[in-house]
Amino acid sequence: MIVCALLPRFELAVTTGGREALAEGPVALAPPPGREPRIGEVSGAAEAFGLHPGMLLGEALARCPELALVAPDPIRVAQAWEAILRSLEGIGAAVEAERAGVAYFDGQLLIGLHGSEGRVIAATRRALRHPARLGVGPTRFCALAAASRARPRRPVVVSGGPTAAREHLAPHPVALLRFRDGVAEVVEPLERLGVSTLGRLAQLSRDAVVDRFGQPGLLAHCLARGEDDPLRPRQAGETLVESLELPESASGPQLQRALSALIDRLLARPERGGRTLRGAVMAAALAAGGTWRERVTFREALSDPERIRVALLPRIDLLPAPADVLWLEAAGFGPPAGDQRALLEEGRARRRARLREAVRQARTSAGPDAALRVVSVDPGSRVPERRAILAPFEA
């Protein structure tokens, strides 16, 4: 029993300040600065013109010249979505959230806590505190499809296994795949080829779909057939954030120095308890309006400020405009002993000592010329003997 909570146009509603603004006309989220010019979420009036998230900006304006573009505000969206996820976790749900506006959890685990399936749905609706559509199904994607057809106060429940999921998914449009990461890119090609529903996609040969679309096609085909991965609930943890208000709109070296100061302040927080960081989230309030947010995952858990700077400084150069406020948040913690460089240095010192002892013993038994090294002297000389000489090897 997978429950899906779908909040349609969540990012657009939060960015515009409420759903009332969506009724004024066609509205869409502008493309993020520095990335491919594709629009974000669109209002119902914009959908009437054939617009959809991920459409190229030029095509969207050609179809709807009066389209109003709103600068994205990822910081406000992340804060609002985090509040909703914490509210769902407050009723005992272990939540998985791939993107803002769509959340999944296993409702079967909450029946013993709330008493029945109906009470679980009622508790979920109270926790959301936003107009939401609820769907229940045997898999995540089936629950999402059920939520897309649900009414605001009437959830859709699909009972059974993969067969029931496939039958329920069959009449849904392939555009539903845009809600899943990793398969949104196959929607437009499928529609051009005449594959308009998930049922038609499930009838195609899996080999043919994989040959045409690769791994995304394989995942899309599995989803259309009612197959899906198990839930991956997030680990609810503590939040560690540092912010710095810049006296003047900063960019370039000034912004890099501000980021370095935030790194030092974040590592100095006593709440960190000596733990390493698995990643970080950089965010900024732009002087020209709007916000910017970038998540960076480290290859290994780090606590060295210099190595963290090396990982974050290239990303801060992606900031599209001067910033008034800069934030840095710890994205997951690792063990205190995550940085093993001290052990590596100790191992290198031990190997150098053994090598020096081996050289000493070789010279004792075979003379001073037992261990030599080649030193390049004149690589361009015509005489081979002048190109390099032998010198005593020093470990």
Image (cartoon, rainbow, N blue to C red):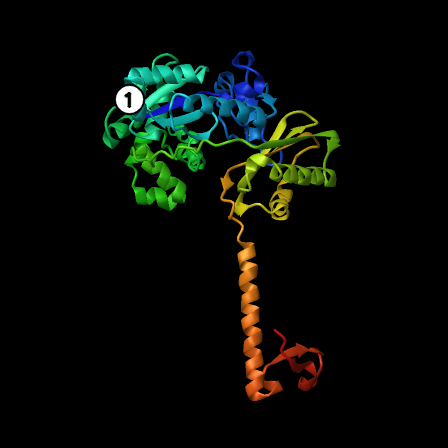
Give the quadrant of the N terminus: top left
Q: Say above or below: 382 vs 87.
A: below
Residue toward you, 374 or 252: 374
**Residue found 69% across the figure and 40% down from its top:** 256
Residue 202 occupies quadrant:
top left
Residue 142 is left or right of residue 40, and the answer is left
Secondary structure under the numbered disc 1 in the rendered image: helix
The residue that disc 1 covers is 112
Q: How many labels does the image show?
A: 1
Q: How crowded is mark 1: few (under 14 residues within 10 Å), some or many (20 or more)?
A: few
Question: Picture coordinates of residue 7 (x, y %)?
Answer: 44, 20
Of residues 125 and 114, the one nearer the viewer is 114
Answer above or below: position of 18 versus 226. Answer: above
Q: Residue type at mark 1?
A: Gly
Kindly identify the residue that appears in the image at 55 percent across and 83 percent down: 362
Q: Residue 204 placed where, x, y %?
A: 30, 38
For the C terminus, which image quadrant? bottom right
Quadrant in the picture for residue 308: top right
